[in-house]
Amino acid sequence: MSETRRRILLSIPHLSGREERYVREAFESNWVAPLGPNVDAFEAALATYLGVEEVAALSSGTAALHLALVLAGVGPGDTVLVSDLTFVATVNPIRYAGAVPVLVDADEATWNLDPGLLEEALRDLAGHGVRPRALVVAHLFGVCADMDPILAVCREHGLVVVEDAAEALGATYRGRPAGTLGDFGVFSFNGNKVITTSGGGALTARDPALVRRARFLATQARDPAPHYQHSVLGYNYRMSNVVAGIGRGQMEVLAERVEARRANFAFYSDTVGRLPGVRMMPSPAYGQHLHWLSCCTIDPDVFGCDRTALMTRLDREHDIETRPVWKPMHLQPLYADARCYGGAVGEHLFDQGLCLPSASSLTRADLARVAAAMEACRR
């Protein structure tokens, strides 16, 4: 391995230089605490981009998801259906609320929650006298779940729908932004996302009054009074005015970052995707997907080695970071006791799935180096 060769990482922050102006304003005005002009402006920019009335900027996507469940009325003992093939942060807030997660497998056509399996799960639960309160559906790696049939079955059974769009800011489903199709939409601005505030998240809702309620709950639910008075349980979930300044600068280049992620996937599809035994993650025709991470599966019998061996060689021989796709929740020790409908699709994708370097700052030469290394590892 060359000593001067730069390591290619999976997904890193991509700053534009515009962020510094807004952060400097926060320091110069001494407005570094939660809330402030940057938070207000960041929320307004997000709302305009998403085409919604209200957005609440919060400390993390996990906090946003927890608040969505609280606002949906989810409480101790309630049942909440949720995507099985996802990151653990999609499921943990269900337990924060004291509710019981029920896992639903993905389908091969989208890698996202299977609408047919969701319907089957709801019928089966109803037969056992269980009426779930909500569904949390993740848009995996920036590819939208097939929301029309999902929303239809949830309306039939009276479920509140929470979209975990943490990986999907910039994706659309039938012309509508991911995160604006259900009752609630949740976003993340972690350091590896399409845009970042270093850490942070956001919540939107079909009913703007619920977003305003979220802001109240996220600031310790302080009642309007000259003293500190609290009538309901609140949380310390609001975003800092400093990190919101980073978000303001990132919003100004969001369109460019989205296009770069899509271009990465297109390049890999035309190169890596043509290698024997490689199948790129589906890009269903119903949406314009983000492909926050470009993912594929590796058939070891055709490719020449399995996914894990390929990852090791890319790391050690080519200085390229890759990761497996998410390990399904039903395989996690934390959720081993959770009821799961299906599971075979998620297990297969975890066994063979590979996330390729996908940062929006990757150059054409970087992408070509990844593609060449993948081909070399077949030999």
Image (tube, rainbow, N blue to C red):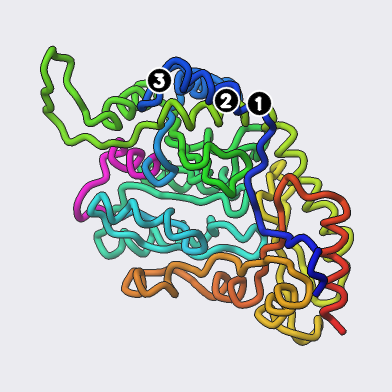
Mark 3 to mark 1 CA distance (whole Å): 19 Å
Residue 354: where, in percent of width, then height?
Answer: 67, 68
Residue 343: where, in percent of width, then height?
Answer: 50, 72
Residue that carries the numbered disc 3 in the rendered image = 31
SS state under label 3: loop
Amino acid at pointer 1: Arg
Label 3 or label 2, whichever comes before in sequence order: 3
Mark 2 to mark 1 CA distance (whole Å): 8 Å
Whether the magenta-drawn stretch holds residue 320 is answered as no
Q: Residue at x 22, y 47 (%)?
A: 75
Q: Which region is colored magenta?
A: 64-79
Q: Nearer the viewer, residue 280 or 35?
A: 35
Relative to 325, is 69 above or below? Answer: above
SS state under label 1: loop
Relative to 322, is 287 above or below? Answer: above
The residue carrying pointer 3 sits among few (fewer than 14), some (14 to 19) or many (20 or more) residues within 10 Å by Cα, namely: some
Q: Nearer the viewer, residue 305 or 11?
A: 11
Residue 322: where, in percent of width, then height?
Answer: 67, 66
Q: Residue at x 28, y 25 (%)?
A: 216
The tag on residue 18 is 1
SS state under label 2: helix
